Amino acid sequence: MRINSGYWAVVGVAAWAVSVMAAPAPAPTTKPATAAASAPAAVAAGVPATASAQDAAAKGGLSAFFHAMFAGDREGAFALLAYTDSKQPKAKEAAEAMFGEILAEQRLRKAVAAEFGDKANDFGVGMGASDVADFEKELAAATVKMNGESANISMGAGPTYMVVLQGGKWLVDFDKTQANMGPLPEGADLTGLQKKAAGYEQLAKDVAAKKFGTVEDVSKAVDKVDSEADKPAGTVPATGSGPGTR
């Protein structure tokens, strides 16, 4: 699994974990009295029976965001983010660049799977089923610390996510979670993320148009996108976009 290692982008609970659709865990013998309406079934099943309904709802909001990311659902994912720090006016732009790249990788991965079937199992871009399963296990075991209409969800040795209750829904608090992860991307870093996202989106279209003969050809094209995006400003990009043009 290859995914941008900066900011929130690493899956498997190494930074901002992004995952969904894990195989449902065995259902607990006693379910909370209520659960978040938006919580995916896999997460609801994974919440320990002793967890409060409020804890389950907070976890459900976090999982709903990751489900949208894994599915490549840009609109759905961004609808589940909250920006709570007015001192970070560029937070939304940063989030769009960071998560936009991850979403583009997911869509490329899905395009490769649709085109090449089982041959795409080893494609190193985006998140796969094992990443999903790892995240769901960590989420089920995570501890929740409630603070009124906000909560901290601690993933053991992994990161801590902040969620906030707004309009009756638990949303991921981008500003407070990012503050724990590091600075917002800016300058060349921000531009690089945007270029990669655009490049992956184009590759997904090219895969669907059958412009690549093998998964390896797609992987080489991904390397080219990364290389071009990481070049300093003012560098003249290489010509050609298809297989064998590196």
Image (cartoon, rainbow, N blue to C red):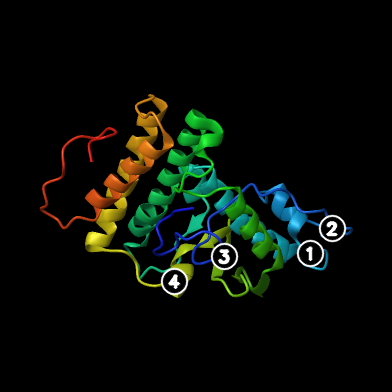
Q: Which residue is mark 2?
A: 28
Q: Which residue is mark 3?
A: 163
Residue 190 falls left or right of residue 59: left
At x 34% / y 59%, what residue is drawn?
Answer: 94
Residue closer to the observer: 148 or 58: 58
Please rate how many residues cluster around mark 4, counting C-alpha atoms within 10 Å: few if below 14, some from 14 to 19, many from 20.
Answer: some
Residue closer to the observer: 200 or 85: 200
**Considering the numbered disc 4 on the image, is that residue within a helix, a strand or a loop?**
helix
Inspect the image, locate mark 3, and give the three-letter code of the amino acid beneath it: Val
Of marks 3 and 1, which one's residue comes earlier in the chain?
1
Front disc: 3 or 1: 1
Inspect the image, locate mark 2, and give the three-letter code of the amino acid beneath it: Pro
Q: Quadrant of the C terminus?
A: top left
Of marks 4 and 1, which one's residue comes earlier in the chain?
1
Residue 232 visible in image: yes
At x 82% / y 60%, what residue is drawn?
Answer: 32
**Considering the numbered disc 1 on the image, is that residue within a helix, a strand or a loop?**
loop
Of marks 2 and 1, which one's residue comes earlier in the chain?
2
Of marks 4 and 2, which one's residue comes earlier in the chain?
2
Of marks 3 and 4, which one's residue comes earlier in the chain?
3
Inspect the image, locate mark 1, and give the three-letter code of the amino acid beneath it: Pro
